[in-house]
Image (cartoon, rainbow, N blue to C red):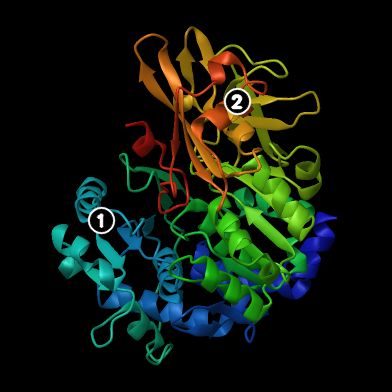
Amino acid sequence: MPIAKLYRTGLLTPVGLYRLLESIATTGINLMALLRLAAKLHPRRTAVVGEEEQLSYAQLWQQAEALAVALHVDYGIRRQQNIAIACRNHPAAIKAIFAASRLGAHVFLINPEMSADRIAGLAERLKFDFYIYDLQDSQAIERAALQARSLPAYHPTDPSVDRISSSMPGSRKARLPKVKTGNIVVMTGGTTGQPKPASRKPSLFDFLPPFIALLRQVHLDRYRSVYIATPIYHGFGLAALLIGVILGAELYVTPRFEAARSTTLITRHQIQVVTLVPLMLQRMLRHDPEALSSLRCILSGGAALNPALAAETLDRLGPKLFNLYGTSEAGFCILATPERLEKKPASIGQPVVGVRGKIAIDEDRVASDRIIGRLCIRSAWSTSQKSWIETGDLAYRDLEGDIFLCGRVDDMIVSGGENVYPIELENVLMQHPDIESAVVVGIPDPEFGQRLKAVVIAKQNATLDRAILLDWLKPRVARYQMPAIVEFRDELPYTPLGKIDRKSMSD
């Protein structure tokens, strides 16, 4: 079946194989070879639709190549140099990623929402040679003293990625040698904590197994339009971009996610696939679930999918929801299909082909079924191919091999001598008919060492208070799982990636 699917995409046809070899022979082994291949196979197909511009695959390739020439000739960018790209989702950012890879540079994808001080610290620590940024974030450039070594994505009058790439692309003869790709680096963490680089060198052979897994189990080859709602500077969004290009899909991007605008976009263009984090899915369901009727595939990742949200999505929209689990270091590694989520909405599924997973008690002991331990992953496409990677998540495996998350290693608390996992109380709270969202964190307690604090968002017009909620919880959870504090709020704090900002709630 994988061979048949690859053939239908055009990649394993005689023409596809010829174009792939031609692209590698022309550009070298880098991301631009993939874009050139797509441009040769589907030149007139729409490649990317953004708020600023719409480009065919031929145009996107030509403009990315023109940008690479300009960065090399006019700005002196060379192989192995460090190029930081701190942009939201728009066509200029996509062109910059492919152009930087074409030059063999190391590409650092930076969260543009980070503070100017944090970006300045990254620039000093990681030694950026060049910086591509969104104009509204120019203060970060000034703070990091990068003004002379930077280029905005868009600018009304001055040189920018957009103006350089779109002004007569191809008019300058390319003088670029063939190069091997540099590293693609995404940053773990966001606006809080110290971001750490997770670096990997893209490889066709390493990329093939997870790509085939998505073809076999998600059937992405059946669809032609994809809305990448997740940030491209995050590993999940970047993977969606590269897979979409390989498949020659129409890619829709927006600089920011807003439920109203996103549902309108999906309806207007009858988009078939969306990549998102659970928060985005929840907000679109609350705003206008009927607007999502054109979707045939919903890929959720980047944050934990609440079982109640999974069940609601499947009930409202049908068997279209897939839960993708991965980390910046391990990459995409575990998948839950709609059929599995129907049966076990709390499960993240099972490792895809080519991935080994284990639940470890310590370095020498592996947990047996239903015993909680540390989730570890090993695969050819992780950042550490020859050793196990600790994901930082606690999990257990059931008798059928399905994996269930129990929160982050740092989230577990010890209360009165008992190991307590906040996610278990969260899942129970989300079953309450009057609760919209709930997050549970650990807090210090002079008697028990630690106790649980529940932060709850009640549904509109719901009558719910602490006493009512605790009475409802008593028969459903153990004594040590009962929250010491119940706090009602109007909204929860989230990071720009759509993850719960737990630290702000436990302070």
Which residue sits at x=33%, y=74%?
153
Quadrant location of residue 246?
bottom right
Which quadrant of the figure has residue 75?
A: bottom left
Residue closest to the eye, 454 or 263? 454
Q: Position of residue 219 (x, y in %)?
A: 77, 59
Nearer to the camera, 69 or 9: 9
Label 1 neighbour load within 10 Å: few <14, some 14-19, many 20+: some
Residue 235 higher or lower than 11, as above or below: above
Q: Position of residue 204 (x, y in %)?
A: 60, 55
Q: Splitting the image into 4 quarters, where does residue 476 fall?
A: top right
Amino acid carrying mark 2 in the image: Asp
Residue 471 image label = 2
Kindly tell me whether residue 85 is visible in this rendering.
Answer: yes
Q: Which mark is residue 315?
A: none
In this orientation, which residue lies closer to the viewer: 331 or 401?
401
Q: How many marks?
A: 2
Q: Which mark is residue 128?
A: 1
In the picture, measured across the screen, residue 158 lies left or right of residue 188, that is left
The reply to whether callout 1 and callout 2 are in contact (CB within 8 Å) is no
Q: Amino acid at mark 1?
A: Phe
In screen coordinates, is 371 left or right of 314?
Answer: left
Q: Nearer the viewer, mark 1 or mark 2?
A: 2
**Relative to 187, does residue 149 appear above or below in the rendering?**
below
328 left or right of 332 in image: left
The percent position of residue 232, horizontal first and vertical second, equals 47, 61
State the quadrant of the N terminus: bottom right
